[in-house]
Image (cartoon, grey):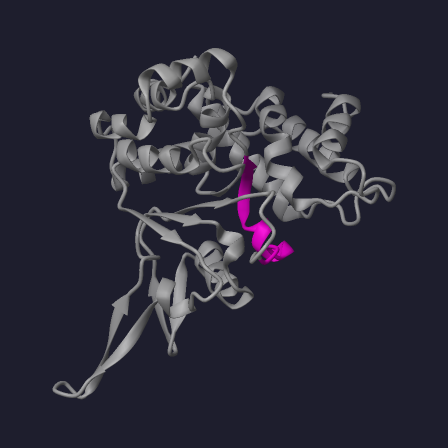
Amino acid sequence: MLNPKIEPILKQLNALILGKQEVIVQLMACILARGHVLLEDVPGVGKTTLAYALATVLGLKYQRVQFTNDMLPADLLGVSIFQPQKGQFTFHPGPIFHSFLLADEINRASPKLQSALLEAMEERQVSIDGETYALPKPFLVVATQNPIEQQGTYPLPEAQLDRFMMRLSLGYPAEQAEKKLYLQGDRRQFIPRLKQVANEALLCQWQKEAASVAIAPAAADYVYRLVEATRQPSKFKIGLSPRAGLALVTAAKAYAWLHGRQHVLPEDIKALWVVVAAHRLQPIETQRNSVVLLNEILNYVKVV
């Protein structure tokens, strides 16, 4: 049973993005956990439409930034401009000063720009010319990247990937959903019909409620044993860090709250294990997939 506070949001998003209910639930859990999301997918499956629709129903100030390899940190963060009549510098904030930032094709950004984004995602603040500026509350980054496009891209560094709580993929629609799409037309035309359900203050309140969900010692032990299994020398180059385990716990709390519960169940942890862990790991055997290995771990690490 879904939390009645969130159900109107999910209902609208599911009507817009057809056949992707579980991905939308995972995305909503990430937002409730104050996490950032990496959407990795082929072009044309609705990543941007989903992001804009989500910002609309949540009532968040939305900004889309198309990342390019010649983009400078100042283009994203803002710049201080000297005003002679006042004899001082005035800061002009950049597009990052929005509650909801869609970083489109983030892997086209230069390493210097990615480093600038790193502080914003982790500290929720930016430093410019010795001054520190707080970002809005809430602050969410939804980034997209195309896994098959290599020309003109920069691989995201491990530190950057680690700042994304989840990596999600919409994938191609199911047969009936795609046929319905052909009959009804581009989903973006339906965005103006969406109704705002929340606002910034209400979302912050929901995030606090999700953070207060209880996790029993047995559930924490289960998370630890999953994380510890990735550190075995036969599977991954480097196992998951405690930060990754904490991200899984935080996301599981939000997932439980989203389903109307005040305690974490093993099913919450299982539902998010792969999307929280996969982008943080590199298999030792390059022909093996981290998702497959993580599902194997899920199968043999038992709930006690």
- For the C terminus, the image quarter is top right
Quarter occupied by residue 24: top left
Residue at the far left: name it. 85
Q: In this view, does 251 lie to the left or right of 102?
A: right
Up/down of 182 relative to 99, above or below: above
Q: Which of 186 and 52 is in front in this view?
A: 186
Q: Is residue 125 left or right of residue 88?
A: right
Using the image, determine if residue 60 lies above or below residue 265.
below
Q: Is residue 158 magenta?
A: yes
Residue 212 visible, this angle? no
Q: Nearer the viewer, residue 215 or 286?
A: 286
The quadrant where residue 157 appears: bottom right
Q: Which range is magenta?
A: 154-168
Residue 282 lies, in percent from the top left, at: 74, 45
Provide residue 92's location: percent of width, then percent of height: 25, 69
Say whether residue 296 is magenta: no
Q: Position of residue 243 (x, y in %)?
A: 62, 48
Q: Which residue is drawn at 31% across and 53% down?
A: 136
Instruction: Give me the residue at 64% from left, 27% from top.
Output: 219
